[in-house]
Amino acid sequence: MSGSAADRRIRSLRPPKPKVDPYKAHGSVIDEERRPGATIERALTVFLAGAECPFTCSFCDLWQWTIDGATPNGALVRQLEDVLGTLGEPSPDRLKLYNASNFFDRRAVPIADHAAIAALAAPFTGITVESHARGIGPDVVDFARRLNGRLEVAIGLETVHADAMAHLNKRLDFDRFDRAADDLAAHDIDLRVFVLLGTPYVRAEESVEWTMRSVEYALARGAAVVSIIPVRGGNGELERLASLGHFTSPTLTELESALDQCLFLGPGVVTADCWDAERLAACDTCRPARLQRLRRLNVSGRSEPRVACAECAS
């Protein structure tokens, strides 16, 4: 991956990548997940090991979970077989296949493996995969037709702040996102959207507002689920941007505020991504209670009072 000057700079600032076994999934987790219509699903998320995404976004930390080079044929099938072989009863409703890249990039997920992956996914009523908007095309439709369950594709919109989007090195514009959303809808495929909190080049005092605008944009284009993801530092580029005053790490309070303001924007479901949320700046005394509240809101969709803490007077 030679890429642009921005690509090379971003990669040069990364810490060393851990060695990743292409035949072993990073892990899996089963969670309760709220869906449109106030239904609750049990969702199995499998974190697959495969090729790195060809897009070098300035905020990305997923590259560290990828291998060098293309994903070998059959590797993802073996990973999925191993995880599914350990499942007990009852079986989850949804299977989420997150490969830290783009499912419809043939370098990351060999097209020859689609049939076997679809067969392994047969027991699930919903299947979620992730892709850049540029990956939405005939391969998506073909994969959806192979499935017994309903396909959902998760796409990173990230932000509708035009200046910030231009600096993310994502190779995405709003027309491209809109076309991807329309293409999925035309083929009766569900759309899940990721938006950022703490987007570089968005002023810290405006961060929550722009997250809410981004959620509204995604919902207006038919998103079934929108997940608010706080930007996580540690990739080198974000630390460079912070030193220049272009990035401020989001706080746990800001994540709470974003979810509280977006919870009822529907008809799609809006949730806060709590992965590694314990790393967000927060009061040590009330952090556990705040995280527990966010997880409850994600599942219930019902508002509840904010945590009161004498230690931080919040």
Image: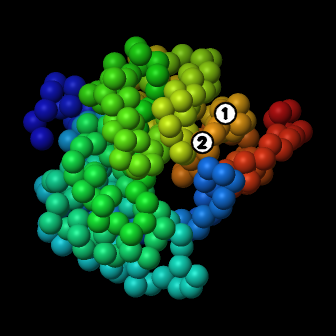
* Secondary structure category for the residue under label 1: loop
Residue in the image at 48% along x and 32% along y: 221
- According to the picture, the residue beneath numbered tag 2 turns out to be 268
* Secondary structure category for the residue under label 2: loop
Residue 230 rendering spot, x and y as whole percentages: 53, 38
Residue 45 rendering spot, x and y as whole percentages: 46, 64
Determine whether, in the image, residue 160 is placed left or right of residue 1: right
- According to the picture, the residue beneath numbered tag 1 turns out to be 265
Q: Observer-nearest residue: 186 or 209?
A: 186
Q: Observer-nearest residue: 46 or 235?
A: 46
- Distance between mark 2 and mark 1 Cα atoms: 8 Å
Corner quadrant of residue 219: top right
Residue 25 rendering spot, x and y as whole percentages: 34, 69
Q: Tell me, yes or no, if residue 95 can be seen here.
A: no
Determine whether, in the image, residue 258 is placed left or right of residue 73: right
Determine whether, in the image, residue 262 is placed left or right of residue 170: right
Query: Which disc, if any, is residue 164?
Result: none
Residue type for callout 2: Gly
Q: Look at the numbered discs 2 and 1 and tell me whether their residues touch, using CB distance below 8 Å.
A: yes
Q: In this view, does 312 lie above or below 18?
A: above
Residue 47 rendering spot, x and y as whole percentages: 39, 63
Residue type for callout 1: Leu
State the quadrant of the N terminus. top left
Q: In this view, does 251 lie above or below 276?
A: above
